[in-house]
Image (cartoon, rainbow, N blue to C red):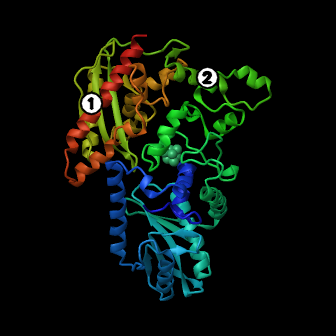
Amino acid sequence: MSGPVPAARVRATDLYDLAVCPHRIALDRRLPREARTPPAPATAQLLAYGLALEAEVAAALGYPQPEHPPGDFAEGARQTRALLESGVPGVYQAVLYDGRHLAVPDLLRRVDGASRLGAFHYEPGDVKAGLSPRADQVLQVVYAGRLLGELQGRDPDHGFLVLGDRREERFPLGELRHVLASAVAQVEAIVERGATGGAEGGAAGSSAGGTAADGGETFPFLGPGCAGCRWRGTCVPDLLARQDLSLVDGMTRTRRRLLVRHGVDSVPALAALDPAAWRAAGRPPLGLDLLTRQAAALLERRVALTRPLELPALPAGALLLHLERDPLDADAVALAAWAPCDARGAAGPAAVRILRDAADRAAAAVELAALLDAAPRPLFHFGGAAPGALDALAEAAGLDPRRQAGLAAHLCDLAAALRRAASFLPVWRYELEQVDAALGGAPLPGPDEADEPAFLYAAFLRDGVPGAWGDALRELGERRLARLARVASWMLAR
Ligand code: SF4
């Protein structure tokens, strides 16, 4: 069995994990690799896509790569130094390692300006599949720049990201160094605590809670990052068994930490808490009026509507609409699905459109607009993603702004209607899958039970990856419309 990540090593990828969930960093140091849950097939495909893109960019550049036995970063660092001292135009997957801090940037490239190496120095860059840079990706490049600066005796002025469309974003590193220093200090604190397990002991941590700001103590917290996380098989069962506070929608790590400090460490304890007494005791305001009601709904598995649900009249029924964008390209809607429904939410036949390119997207927008022209009616959707996706479709079709605005005016967000009615449902998060399950009295789907994202299937289809991806996309669209229909029916009945 291979051991955990060495406790004393701070990796560039820890900066990403710090942004998503600090507890990952601690578990990486505490648990063996074999305890990890493998990535879901689609996530694995996405990782493979990213690696292939890196290799393609590197092959086009023809940069050498330091050779070293797997895991022997000291040897990799020696090889990297030798390459830089020889003045090569660039290096692929250089190893920057000072014995404690490790970065393996995808690219280093030679630029003018004197350094310990000669009349030149190097600047770091990474290759990323997305079309716009994320802050954590930039920070990883800044981190590599710091280690590179120590090696070449000069801080590089700039770093860069090569994005999924092969476009380069170059940015100055200097201003970001103080942000890096703070993030690295947080990771170091977690890593140090992770080496001993801190006061938490077991794999999933205790309810004592905390963050890096608390001397590196971390705790599991149900969040969007859990869905694809390597530690979901460890944390999620533990969170459910303990009825952890993070199961309550609206909970934040800071709120959880404060509540735990005052002995409120589970959903039942929060449901029993009296917000007025909390305030009277001079404790910090935490929005407890809403949190305690949400905890009670979850504990008692009941639905509470504080105000009447407001939905538009439906003389011509409505269209149920599901649009799903590609997170790597905000302009690309990968799937459009719609179905008519009557005034009681009963759905008619579903239309599912797989959108592989701009022409598919334009055709879907035109088809949808024609349906609304023929019979104007609300477009029922769930959550905040549909307006941007509908705009992207309308742009692809070249609809003029008035026509675009006309389309958007039909949108009616059922999630927002639930919020306006101050609804409390027995869900962990107000997502379509969870709301549908709760209203139907079914068990809530866990982070691993969410549908794979449609854009991945669409990408596999476009790239000729073997598999019945078209069928999978059609089933996905129909499944989501069926959920939307059940939620709409329930709401319309009230
Ligand atoms: S499963 Fe969730 S709580 Fe656990 S480490 Fe991963 S993201 Fe954090």
Total marks drawn? 2
Q: Is residue 376 above or below residue 121?
A: above
Q: Is residue 436 left or right of residue 358?
A: right
| Secondary structure under the numbered disc 2 in the rendered image | helix
Label 2 to label 1, Cα distance in Å?
Answer: 37 Å
> Looking at the picture, which amino acid does disc 2 mark?
Ala
For residue 50, say whether it is visible. Answer: yes
Nearer-the-camera pick, 315 or 226:
226
For residue 410, say whether it is visible. Answer: no
At horizontal 41% and vertical 63% (from top left) the residue drawn is 167
* Residue 343 in which image quadrant: top left
Q: Badge 2, how many Cα within 10 Å: few under 14, some, many 20+?
A: many
On-image quarter of the C terminus: top left
Nearer-the-camera pick, 457 or 280:
280
At horizontal 52% and vertical 14% (from top left) the residue drawn is 305
Residue 46 picture location, percent across and down: 35, 54
On-image quarter of the N terminus: bottom left
| Secondary structure under the numbered disc 1 in the rendered image | helix
Q: Identify the disc placed on residue 158.
A: none
At horizontal 39% and vertical 80% (from top left) the residue drawn is 64
Q: Identify the disc placed on residue 271.
A: 2
Q: Badge 1, how many Cα within 10 Å: few under 14, some, many 20+?
A: many
> Looking at the picture, which amino acid does disc 1 mark?
Glu
Q: Is the CB atom of the residue marked by disc 2 within 8 angstroms of ligand 1's nearest atom?
A: no
Q: Is residue 492 above or below residue 199?
A: above
Q: Which residue is mark 1?
A: 478
Q: Specify which label sits upstream in the sequence, 2 or 1.
A: 2
Nearer-the-camera pick, 411 or 146:
146
Q: Is residue 289 above or below residue 216?
A: above
Q: Nearer the viewer, mark 2 or mark 1?
A: 2
